[in-house]
Structure formats: structure tokens, C-alpha cells
Image (cartoon, helix red, strand yellow):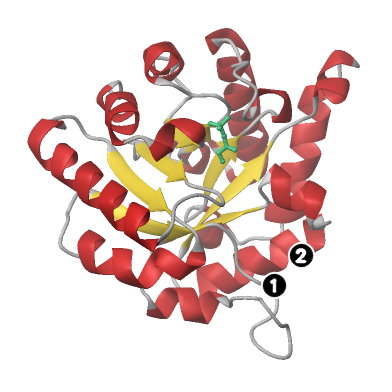
Amino acid sequence: MRKKIIAGNWKMHKTATEALALATEIIQMANDELHNQAHLVLIPPFVHLHSLSKLTAASSRVALGAQNCHHETQGAFTGEVSAAMLAAVPVQYVIVGHSERREYFQETPAQIAQKIDLLLAHHLTPIFCCGESLAVREAGNAYGYVSSQVIDSLFHLSPEAMAQVVIAYEPIWAIGTGKTATSTQAQEMHWHIRQEIAKKYGESLALNLSILYGGSMKPDNAADLLACPDVDGGLVGGASLQSRDFINIAKAVH
Ligand code: 13P
């Protein structure tokens, strides 16, 4: 049975007070209202990880994640945060290769691969993001493009390491645009990613991997997306900033 995960990527939102309030509300609502098998992950900015870890440590339903880490173990990299630091908080999940980091911070597939290695060495779960731009989709190259992203940053892993990874398919044209992939588009790409992994690592490993969808997931479209056989959860941006919306998305997991 694949793990069903609803992760909230808060991106660069929420002050310390706001972050504590949001996390407290989500944990309370999860305790009171969430009766399915969804695992929640809160992914706030780095500065809130320590204070939120005190809340998530007491919750069996809600884990903590970080939005990024540096690709070197340590050193003179002003402004950066290492995998070891995140493991010590502790967080359980770390996003790697988000399209915003690939685009605005020029992250390369090789750096993303290095980050994944470091995270796995610290027993952290990477949430590896992939997804094509509108131009790539309209040119008919979406499947090949996403395959390359997966191959370039993940296929150096041993089967044991690969089995620890969570994948998030986030079509860039659907992020923050209000334009969601249809459930058919999401299912087709998730199936494609799973087949790609099955070809390299075998059917059984691929069938056990959680593949999340991200891109304008909201309470009113979550049920359709999460009903797809190969969609195992969501990586939610905007709607994760409201406790009610986030919990209602999590309730759509079945
Ligand atoms: P939105 O849900 O705001 O489209 O963001 C998706 C995302 O980028 C999550 O990582």
C-alpha cells in the first residue's frame, strides 16, 4: 500500500506568529476531523522549522519538511542550510528540485542529484519535483522532458535508495496559476513516471513509490485528482496557507 501524503509547501509565506497559528490549527483539525489514511507534511520556511518541530513531534498525523537544502555537506556557503542541519531539527521530508528553484536559482540536475544523496544519507525523505513548462507541453514533449528529469537526478540511486524517494509531478503551467492539470493529464503523467521507474527498478519498487500531484490543487479539485489510481497525494502551495482548505484537501484522500 502506497503512502498517501498531503504536503503543504508554504514557500516564502508566514511570519513566526502566523506560522505557529497555522500549524496549531492544522494539527488540531487533523486530530478532530481526519479519519482517513492521509499523512500530512508541513513545509514552512527554514526559520520556522525549529518552533514547528515541537508541535509536529507531538502529532502522529503531521510531519515536518523543509523546502530545500544545499548540495554540499558544509562550508563557506553564506545563506545556505545543510542536510545535516535539517536532520538535526528534526525534519522528515525535504523538497528538492522545485521548478521555482530550478528557474530562479539555476539549480542543475546534477546538484539536485547531490542533494538527494545527502538527504538519503541523513535518513530524510526527498520530495523530488519534476514537471514541464507550457511550451514543452504544447510542443508535445512533456513525457520525454519529465522522463529526462527523473533519469538525470534519480537513476544513479541504488534500488534501496530509490525506494525512499517521494516524487511530485508539478506541471509548471499549473503552479500558482489556478490552472490545474485535468485528472486525465495528471493520471497519464503519473502512470508514465511509474512506468519509467518500473523499467529501471522493477514493477514492485515502482508500485510502492508515492507520486504526488502539485499545481493549483484546491478543495474543489482535490477529490478528482486524488481519485486517480497513480496519484498518491498532493504537494499543495497556495491552498496550504489556509488550515480549512488544507484539511479539506486531506479529507479527499481515500
Ligand atoms: P500552488 O498550489 O500554489 O499552485 O503551488 C504548487 C506548488 O508549487 C507546490 O510545491
Residue 2 visible in the snapshot:
no
Element assignment for label 1 = loop
Q: Is residue 29 left or right of residue 47?
A: left
Q: Which residue type does callout 2 highlight?
A: Gln
> Is residue 28 found left or right of 9 in the rendered image?
left
- Residue with the most extreme bottom position: 75
Residue at horizontal 31 percent and vertical 55 percent from the top: 63
The answer to whether mark 2 and mark 1 are in CB contact below 8 A is yes
Q: Residue at x 35, y 72 (%)?
A: 50
Mark yes or no: residue 80 visible.
yes
Q: Which residue is mark 1?
A: 71
Q: Residue at x 62, y 69 (%)?
A: 117
| Left or right: where 62 falls relative to 231 | left
Picture quadrant of ligand 1: top right
Q: Quadrant of the C terminus?
A: top left
Quarter of the image where the N terminus is located: top left
Q: Residue 143 in the image: x percent, y percent?
A: 77, 25
Where is mark 2, residue-wise?
111
Q: How would you rate the neighbour count of disc 2 (Cα within 10 Å): few for under 14, some for 14-19, many for 20 or more?
A: some
Amino acid identity at mark 1:
His
Q: CA distance from mark 2 to mark 1?
A: 6 Å
Q: Which residue occupies 54% across, 69% down?
A: 119
Label 2 or label 1, whichever comes before in sequence order: 1
Dividing the picture into quadrants, the one containing residue 52 is bottom left
- Please tell me whether mark 2 sits on a helix, a strand or a loop: helix
Quick check: is the Cβ at mark 1 less than 8 Å away from ligand 1? no
**Quick one: 40 or 175, which is closer to the camera?**
175
